[in-house]
């Protein structure tokens, strides 16, 4: 049975979904050119498998799923370099956060109150800009994990499978990411 | 160091457990260790408060940024439309 709802309408794709898919991508990959390429690749890939579209989900959901897989491919490629120089650098930044003797905070890195708990919207805007800058400093692999967890709410199992990480590795990354991010916020906010 | 002293003094371990607890699960033993640590460590209590707040703000930021972002330019869309039509005509 073929009904209107489970057919694809490729002629309308650009008009209906291009902006949405682009916004979806740019939120996850901050490179504009790469984001455009991914949107284009998504449409072309969708054309290839248009006959497999069963109408179980909306056309937009279907296209977004194709795009999402492409984004994860990018994450995987970015973070699979033999030498992750950016990870080494980021680890170096936190090397002296804690005493190597007993694991206690070293005095110059002790967390201090931010004073953002009251959540003034004006303050939040400024804080968000710093947050964005600090996130951009994270290594590609850490940022991939962080985005998949906090933006897409993916389960730990899925993130580990897709980025080929062990669970132990995943938790180390979650911890290290937050240590650097928090320290960066403290440095630029207070 | 004895086992108790190990956790009361180890902020690295404590912050790890705080992060793990935020988005996953920690064992009962880890819960107890973390509690004991936090009772005696005001610095990690600050950390705990902040890291939860950061997660909240990150989420708000992520969801906000999806709406704020400008769309694609018309030239790109026009080219893309032509590309798709060309592919469709091949079939």
Image: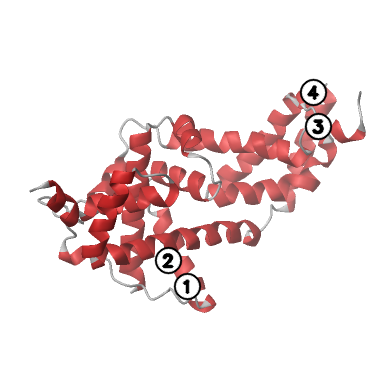
Residue drawn where x is 16% and y is 52% of the image: A103
Q: Position of residue B30 (x, y in %)?
A: 29, 46
Q: Position of residue A39 (x, y in %)?
A: 66, 41
Q: Position of residue B68 (x, y in %)?
A: 63, 62
Whether pointer 1 and pointer 2 mark residues with C-beta atoms closer than 8 Å, the reply is: yes
Residue drawn where x is 32% and y is 55% of the image: A180
Q: Are marks 4 and 1 on the same chain?
A: yes
Q: Nearer the viewer, residue A122 or B34?
A: B34
Which quarter of the figure has residue A166? top left
Q: Nearer the viewer, residue A20 or B50?
A: B50
| Callout 2 crowding tier (Cα within 10 Å): few <14, some 14–19, many ≥20 | some
At mark 4, the secondary structure is helix
Residue position for label 1: A126
Residue drawn where x is 39% and y is 45% of the image: A142
Query: Of label 1 and label 3, which has the lower sequence position?
Result: 3
Whether pointer 2 and pointer 4 mark residues with C-beta atoms closer than 8 Å, the reply is: no
Q: Are marks 2 and 3 on the same chain?
A: yes
At mark 1, the secondary structure is helix
Q: Nearer the viewer, mark 2 or mark 3?
A: 3
Residue B77 appearing in the image:
yes
Quarter occupied by the N terminus of chain A:
top right
Scheme of image coloration: secondary structure
């Amino acid at each position: 049975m073929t009904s209107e709802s489970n057919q694809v309408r490729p002629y309308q794709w650009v008009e209906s979904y291009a902006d949405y898919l682009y916004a979806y991508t740019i939120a996850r990959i901050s490179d504009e050119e790469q984001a455009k390429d991914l949107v284009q690749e998504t449409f072309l890939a969708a054309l290839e498998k248009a006959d497999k579209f069963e109408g179980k989900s909306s056309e937009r959901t279907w296209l977004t799923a194709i795009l999402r897989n492409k984004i994860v491919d990018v994450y995987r490629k970015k973070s699979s370099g033999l030498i992750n120089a950016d990870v080494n650098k980021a680890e170096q930044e936190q090397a002296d956060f804690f005493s190597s003797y007993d694991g206690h905070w070293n005095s110059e890195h002790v967390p201090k109150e931010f004073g953002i708990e009251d959540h003034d919207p004006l303050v939040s805007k400024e804080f968000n800009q710093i947050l964005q800058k600090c996130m951009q400093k994270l290594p590609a692999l850490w940022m991939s994990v962080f985005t998949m967890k906090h933006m897409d709410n993916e389960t730990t199992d899925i993130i580990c499978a897709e980025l080929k990480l062990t669970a132990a590795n995943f938790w180390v990354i979650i911890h290290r990411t937050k240590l650097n991010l928090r320290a960066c916020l403290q440095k630029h906010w207070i | 160091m004895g086992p108790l002293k190990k956790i009361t003094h180890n902020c690295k371990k404590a912050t790890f457990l705080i992060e793990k607890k935020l988005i996953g699960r920690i064992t009962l033993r880890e819960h107890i260790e973390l509690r004991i640590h936090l009772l005696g460590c005001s610095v990690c209590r600050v950390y705990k408060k902040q890291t939860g707040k950061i997660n909240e703000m990150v989420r708000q930021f992520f969801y906000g940024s999806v709406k704020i972002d400008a769309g694609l330019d018309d030239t790109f869309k026009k080219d893309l439309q032509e590309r798709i039509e060309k592919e469709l005509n091949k079939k």
